[in-house]
Amino acid sequence: LNLKSQEFNMKKKILIFGGTGTIGFSIAKNLKEQDYEPILISRNKDDLINKSKEIDCGYEICDILEIEQIEEVSKKYNEDLIGLAYCVGSINLRPLKITKDVDFLDSFKINTLGAINAVKSNLSSLNINNGSILFFSTIAVQQGFTNHSIVSSSKGAIEGLTLSLAAEFAPKIRVNCIAPSLTDSKMSQKMLSNETLKKAIENMHPIPKIGQGDDFGELSSFLLSEKNNWITGQIFHIDGGRSTLRIKS
């Protein structure tokens, strides 16, 4: 029985690129509670060690801008992989008139090309195991925000990629995407450290709060898990209603 149990668990690994971030780690915790084996992937070794110890899971050091590193990590899980979450992201906010080509190119490399290379490097395993892929976009794709042209263009590409790959990989692999509103994370600390600005942003949401990691963990882990057997090609908005609702002020 123990051998059968170990063999079963071998087939339940899920790679989480950006696994030490607020959302990525929340997904990992939820997956661990459901007896899946999340593998945290990040550049920061210290964060990886601490977070992996916290939930007793594996980790890999990898810079998503280096395709060779992505491929090297992926080789280790060729037969065991059933899911992949790409939670890596960047926020570069500035008016279009002061942007440079490199701003858009860097954003595309991190937010879009990194996701593409992560999927390509693990495609065979996901196909064999009827796996699931989860991307992350932003509310700024559906709702226009000032100074968001850099991030909204690269994350808009992620939403297009979600639909295209969901069609291309069906029926073997499910591909979905979550588009969050502003979430409490390392990237957002500059904005959220200003209490007045934080309160103003909270009040822009019909459910007036800043997103937390726990707001994403359960839905994300469901979409990545074997329980999800009929959802693909969808963009889920976890944003306190901000992208679709207007309330009286």
Image: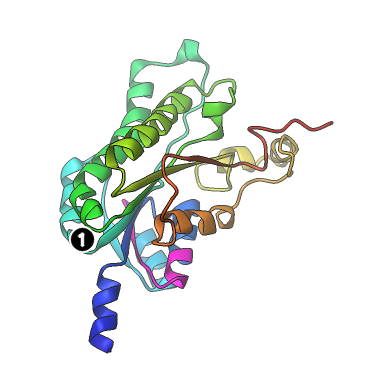
> How many discs appear?
1
In the rendered view of the protein, which quadrant contains the N terminus?
Answer: bottom left
The amino acid type, in three-letter code, at marker 1 is: Tyr
User: How far from the left and from the top, in percent, is residue 111?
Assistant: 37, 35
- Is residue 231 highlighted in magenta? no
- Magenta span of residues: 30-44
Locate residue 200: give its quadrant.
top right
- Residue 245 as seen in the image, left or right of residue 129: right
Which residue of the protein is positioned furthest toward the top in this rendering? 97
Residue 41 visible in the current orientation: no
In the foreground, 116 or 204 = 116
Which residue is identified by label 1? 77
In the foreground, 136 or 228 = 228
Which residue of the protein is positioned furthest toward the right in this rendering? 249
User: How far from the left and from the top, in percent, is residue 170?
Assistant: 31, 43
Residue 22 visible in the current orientation: yes
User: How far from the left and from the top, in percent, is residue 122?
Assistant: 22, 50
Q: Residue at x 44, y 61 (%)?
A: 227
- Is residue 36 highlighted in magenta? yes
Is residue 63 shown above or below 56?
above
Q: Residue at x 48, y 21 (%)?
A: 149
In the rendered view of the protein, which quadrant contains the C terminus?
Answer: top right
Q: Tag 1's secondary structure? A: loop
Is residue 83 shown above or below 9?
above
User: How far from the left and from the top, in percent, is residue 151?
Assistant: 46, 28
